[in-house]
Image: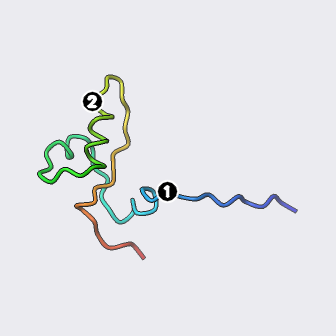
Amino acid sequence: MGKKRKATFKTADEKYAYTTKVVTSSTCLKCKNKCSRGEAYLEKMSKPGAVGRGVPCILTKGRAFK
């Protein structure tokens, strides 16, 4: 018998990332409506040597994929 696969739990950011566009820090910088998630990402990316994957933008929320 094979090993059972351990269930991995996703955070809220990962769970809803599929229904929002992932934007980079340059897009967050231009945004008129600053959200807390975007401001935290900008703070993180302003440090020298920071590497980011982008952040899900709540303002570009769309329908979930089937």
Q: Amino acid at mark 1?
A: Thr
Query: Which residue in the structure is indicated by mark 1?
Result: 11
Q: Quadrant of residue 63?
A: bottom left
Q: Position of residue 23 (x, y in %)?
A: 27, 49
| Mark 2 Cα-neighbour bin, 10 Å: few <14, some 14–19, many ≥20 | few
| In the depicted structure, whether residue 1 falls above or below residue 65 | above
State which tag comes first along the sequence, 2 or 1: 1
Q: Amino acid at mark 2?
A: Ser
At numbered mark 1, what does the secondary structure look like: helix, strand or loop? Answer: loop
Q: Quick one: 24 or 13, which is closer to the camera?
A: 13
Task: Locate residue 4 relative to residue 59 in the image: left or right.
Answer: right
**Which quadrant: the N terminus?**
bottom right
Task: Locate residue 20 relative to residue 5 in the image: left or right.
Answer: left
| In the depicted structure, whether residue 37 falls above or below residue 5 | above
- Residue plotted at (32% across, 53% down): 22
Q: Quick one: 35 or 8, which is closer to the camera?
A: 35
Looking at this rendering, what residue extends furthest in the front direction? 36
- Residue plotted at (73% across, 60% down): 5
Task: Locate residue 13 relative to residue 1 in the image: left or right.
Answer: left
Q: Position of residue 17 (x, y in %)?
A: 39, 59
Q: Position of residue 3 (x, y in %)?
A: 81, 58
Q: Quick one: 22 or 40, which is closer to the camera?
A: 40
**Which quadrant: the C terminus?**
bottom left
Which labelled disc corresponds to residue 46? 2
Q: Are marks 2 and 1 in contact (CB under 8 Å)?
A: no
- Residue plotted at (31% across, 26% down): 47
Looking at this rendering, what residue extends furthest in the bottom direction? 66
